[in-house]
Amino acid sequence: MKKLLLLFFLLLPTPVLAEVKFEIWLSTDRLAFTVGRPRLNNVYIRNRGDDDSYSLTYVKNVENKNLVVVNPLKTTTEVVMSGNVTTIPVEINVLYKLNEKKNPHINFTVSSVTNPNVKKTASLYILSSIPQSLDEFSNYFLSLIILFSTLVFVYKIKS
């Protein structure tokens, strides 16, 4: 019985765990956007293992994925020597104000070209910036603008 059990464990395929020998980080993990104005954020990759090149993918975690345009200026790197850092610039444009309560963010995943199963992910959280159009104002702010405009208009007429 012991021999059969030993044979079973020897024939059982052992999982090969891929060791992550690089680290990634972003220029910033939170970025405030003004609607319609693109911003640049860098994805940094430090190679800790053998010489390798890397590829970048992303996933937009927002309500409407068409409202955020992500444009990596390159999707793969040249061969990075051990210990060196490389950069992948990414241009991001928000076309409409996003609901911050839903925690909008973009996940950037960097994977090794020689071993695509080795991956690391970094997240960029999208914050709102100064409103640029009336569509971005809430009803509260719009009513305050109308109220103060009316008060200024009435005050000018009386004086």
Image (cartoon, rainbow, N blue to C red):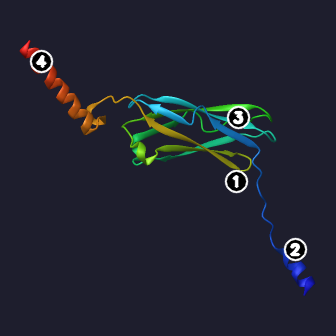
Q: Name the residue under label 2.
A: 10
Amino acid type indicated by mark 3:
Glu
Q: Earlier in the sequence, mark 3 or mark 1?
A: 3
Under circle 4, the secondary element is: helix
Q: Do the residues labelled 4 and 2 touch (CB within 8 Å)?
A: no
Say if 75 sits above or below 8 in the image: above
Q: Quadrant of residue 149?
A: top left
Distance, label 3 to label 4, CA atoms, is 66 Å
Q: Mark 1 points at which residue?
A: 117
Distance, label 2 to label 3, CA atoms, is 40 Å
Q: How busy is the neighbourhood of tag 2: few (under 14 within 10 Å), some, or many (20 plus)?
A: few
Foreground residue among 129 and 71: 129
Under circle 3, the secondary element is: loop
Q: Earlier in the sequence, mark 2 or mark 3?
A: 2
Say if 67 sits above or below 148 in the image: below
Amino acid type indicated by mark 1:
Asn
Q: Which of marks 4 and 2 is in front?
A: 4
Q: Quadrant of residue 28?
A: top right
At x 41% / y 31%, what residue is drawn?
A: 129
Distance, label 1 to label 2, CA atoms, is 25 Å
Q: Mark 4 points at which residue?
A: 155
Q: On the picture, is 151 further left or further right than 70?
A: left
